[in-house]
Amino acid sequence: KLFSFVHASNVVGTINPVRELVAAARAVGAKVLIDGAQSVPHMPVDVQALDADFYAFSSHKMCGPTGFGILYGKREVLETMPPFMGGGDMIREVTMAGSKWNTVPFKFEAGTPAIAEAIGLGAAIDYLQEVGMAWVHDHERAITRYAYERLAEVEGLHILGPGPSERGGLVSFTLEGVHPHDISAILDRSGVAVRAGHHCAQPLHDRLGVHASARASFYLYNTPEEVDVLVDALHQAQDVFAL
């Protein structure tokens, strides 16, 4: 049995109670896979303290190269698993009678690895550690709180998910009378980039009773002034569709 869940939602921003969920999985004998794509770039994370069997996150969400990511796994679990792909360096010994897999992690890394991407991610991690993940988290929280205050001024705007103290640095919302795709197009004219649609989570949008949403995401480089530009652009969107 495998229990998989996100550490932090990419739609509503909820930061899940990981330790409680892991304990529930252990109670029924399940292994745990955590999607940390929305948490590792934004807060301090200790995979050993979380007791995850597997923990995955991506490079491009933490200032690294695209098309690359990390899958952490407990050694004792990985050692019981067979390789999923054949190729160079994942076999330790080959004879006419058979072959033996290489040790962990090499048996899962067949062929030539993404060397340049790994070096790039390493540089990105060094940079984030120099900045400090606690600082990144606090900065995002402050920007998110400010965004909540300013977005409350926009009539007909509805934020999805919990309050700013219980979420990561993103805000998904709907705006009465304006489709999220139109919001995105109009905000783009003001130099504001948001994502519009289902955000790879259509069942969640169905559960929330909305067809789609617009999402503003904040990171270490965003400022309160940029939130002001976002709010001004939303007022412009309302003016356009009020005609």
Image (cartoon, rainbow, N blue to C red):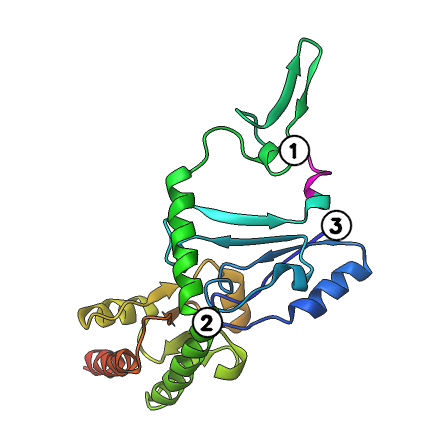
**Residue located 71% across and 11% down the image:** 97
The residue beneath circle 1 is: 103
Going by the numbered disc 2, the residue's amino acid type is Val
Find numbered disc 3 in the image and state the secondary structure of the residue it sits on. Answer: loop
Q: Quadrant of residue 25?
A: bottom right
Q: Is residue 211 magenta?
A: no
Q: Is residue 206 left or right of residue 188?
A: right
Of the numbered discs 3 and 1, the one sitting upstream in the chain is 3
The residue beneath circle 3 is: 1
Of the numbered discs 3 and 2, the one sitting upstream in the chain is 3
Q: Quadrant of the C terminus?
A: bottom left
Q: Is residue 42 left or right of residue 177?
A: right
**Residue range (magenta):** 78-82
Residue 238 drawn above or below residue 28: below
Going by the numbered disc 1, the residue's amino acid type is Thr
Of the numbered discs 2 and 1, the one sitting upstream in the chain is 1
Foreground pick, 119 / 190: 119
The residue beneath circle 2 is: 210
Residue 115 drawn above or below residue 235: above
